[in-house]
Amino acid sequence: MYIVGRILEIKRLTCRIKAFTVEVCERVNTTPGQFMMVWIPQVGEIPLSIAYKEDRLLEFIVAKVGRVTGHMHDNLSKGDRLAIRGPYGRGFTLRNVEKCLMIAGGYGLAPLLYLSHELKRRGTEIDVALGFRTREDVFYTNRFDHVADHVWVFTEDGSYGIKGMVTEVMKKHVKLKDYDIVYTCGPELMMFEVVKHCLEQGVKVEASLERVMKCGIGICGSCILDPLGLRVCKDGPVFDGEVLMKINDFGRYWRCLDGRKVPIKSRFNS
Amino acid sequence: MVGSSSLSIELSGLSLRNPLILASGILGTTFSIMKRIEAEGVGAITTKSITREPRDGYPNPVVVELEYGLVNAIGLSNPGIEYFVHEIKLAKRLLKIPLIVSVAGGEIEDIVYVSRRAADAGADAIELNLSCPHVRGMGMELGTDPIMVKEVVESVRKRVSKPLFVKLSPNVTSIVEIGEAAADGGADVLVAINTVKAMVIDVYLKKPILSNRYGGLSGPAIHPIAVRCVYELYENLGDEVEIVGVGGVETWRDAIELILAGASAVGIGTAIVRRGLKVFREIIQGMAHYLEEEGFSSIDEVVGLAHRR
Ligand SMILES: Cc1cc2nc3c(=O)[nH]c(=O)nc-3n(C[C@H](O)[C@H](O)[C@H](O)COP(=O)(O)OP(=O)(O)OC[C@H]3O[C@@H](n4cnc5c(N)ncnc54)[C@H](O)[C@@H]3O)c2cc1C
Ligand SMILES: Cc1cc2nc3c(=O)[nH]c(=O)nc-3n(C[C@H](O)[C@H](O)[C@H](O)COP(=O)(O)O)c2cc1C
Ligand code: FES
């Protein structure tokens, strides 16, 4: 059943991204990497990663891409109610991590923000690389300041921070072998590169995937990954790199609402 | 340890290693998840209901979780038969257990077409979903009218020689009347029941939650309804057809109850939400134990026992 939440604050982070802080009526037990299904009555319901949690406050970072996210950006304001179910899915590994690297692309930083705070509490040493397209897209880098030892910010055109793709951090800026684990979230082709490189270097890696979600509880079959038959909503959204390398769909195919597969390239190039 | 009592059954000529069947619409969308569910021990798999054209289904929210069940209005989202033929072929190459392809549609012509394509692609049986309660202009209309039901089943029967299952809706005055029509049309197996028409309203937001407003209730809440329907069907049609009991089965007790009422096999759906995919193995072990304990040598002996006076 749904938990009712009230919007306490909306922050405009970039022209495409807003952060919503929601106060929920009961405490929810969550772990970083999990997501919630957020229902805006008469508009729709979408999966959103938990970007931050403190007591009964949940923060969501929302990129405006379509109908529901568009409505959230344009029509919701402080005090409005929404309904949330979850948390769902499996999150990131938290145990036995002394030193980690996080690699995020765009709003993919959402689950990693929550993760970084949780790991900090556990005494993990954290390095973070955040990638954006251009200066106007950069947001929330400061939220990592007091939890991370190093924060690298990349823009593709060099208008802010380091020029280049965020994946270059693995090759040029750090010694990958120093880390117990690399966590990544962002565009799937970016994550594909990260996972492949980490495994080649023998470093454990986890990535958080997105697929169309309907039920969110592992029964409708709209988020299945071939050929292992894994459900992103239940067996994921966070998967181990070794597993991802056995998933032919990873970095290649996305399923549309009717369940047919389409190549991922066409989605992200548009 | 499972003893010597046998759980294997013959259902309309199909050999099942045990009487558990994955119900239609719960997973069953891709060869890969079917393969995974086979590994969990299930006896046969029913696919998601497939239509002639692809369907996006209804917008979210499409499910509401309740304490005693689930209300869904997925809206028959499926990739259409043209695409799904490949999924059937892949599944048939990989699966050792029987594959039942569920077929839905609003027009007889479409239902016959999809059934034929599915059978040609290798489906071991066809299940007609005439009972989906939440697709306007589809399932409901066909499945509630005995004359239409007979006509649809007859039309498919003429063109498809594989075992023919017909799924029944509980949202009718007399499920026996509809079951009879299906049997008259040539159905080999009746599958009962589909979800029970339902609605959930959020008291704070003061609106029906599902985008389609109406949905279908499944899970423990409907189990006694399923038991009653199977009992009635067996009592009236037990000599003509076999029955698959579906509805709120979460434990071996629920499964045995349906078998005692007259089901030869049992469908499992919503239980996966709360019990996970291991539910199949749990129920199989429980049923095997029950057979031993009660002194049956085969599950066949249990079918319809509740009718004996
Ligand atoms: C586990 C998970 C966690 C997520 N976390 C976040 C988050 O923290 N912040 C955030 O902004 N978004 C997140 N998303 C993506 C978000 O759910 C989608 O952007 C949203 O569902 C789009 O809804 P819409 O109605 O606005 O767009 P629609 O009108 O439905 O579609 C517009 C465009 O977005 C694409 N799209 C549809 N669904 C998704 C999807 N699930 N993921 C990506 N693109 C999609 C469509 O293909 C289309 O091109 C997450 C998705 C998943 C599966
Ligand atoms: C999410 C969901 C989707 C379903 N989709 C279909 C479907 O496509 N075709 C169909 O014949 N039945 C469908 N059903 C009904 C089930 O097959 C089953 O008859 C019903 O859920 C009762 O069994 P259960 O309580 O074990 O789930 C669906 C049920 C659920 C919960
Ligand atoms: S969203 Fe329904 S199974 Fe994953």
Image (cartoon, coloured by chain):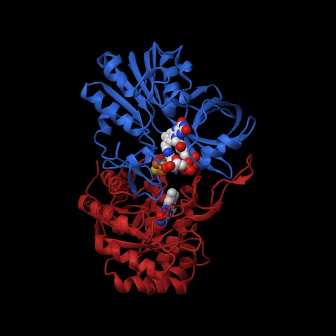
Chain colours: A blue, B red
Quadrant position of residue A74? top right
Query: Between residues A20 and B201, which one lies in front from this camera angle?
Result: A20
- Nearest the eye: B111 or A71: A71
Please give left or right for residue B125 compared with residue A78 in the image.
left
Q: Quadrant of residue A29?
A: top right
| Number of numbered discs | 0
Q: Is residue B67 visible?
A: no
The spot of residue A138 in percent (x, y) is 54, 27
Comparing B148 with B242, the one in front is B148
The picture quadrant where one finds residue A259 is bottom left
Task: Pinpoint residue A237: horizontal percent, then vertical percent.
Answer: 44, 39
Q: Is residue A146 above or below residue B124?
A: above
Q: Residue at x 31, y 22 (%)?
A: A171
Is residue A93 something one can see in this rendering? yes
Residue at horizontal 62%, vertical 34%? A18
B34 is higher (above) or lower (below) than A235: below
x and y percentages locating residue B58 in the rendered image: 56, 59
Horizontal side, residue A76 vs residue B223: left or right: right
Depth check, front residue: B129 or A155:
A155
* Residue B164 spot, x, y in % from top left: 38, 77
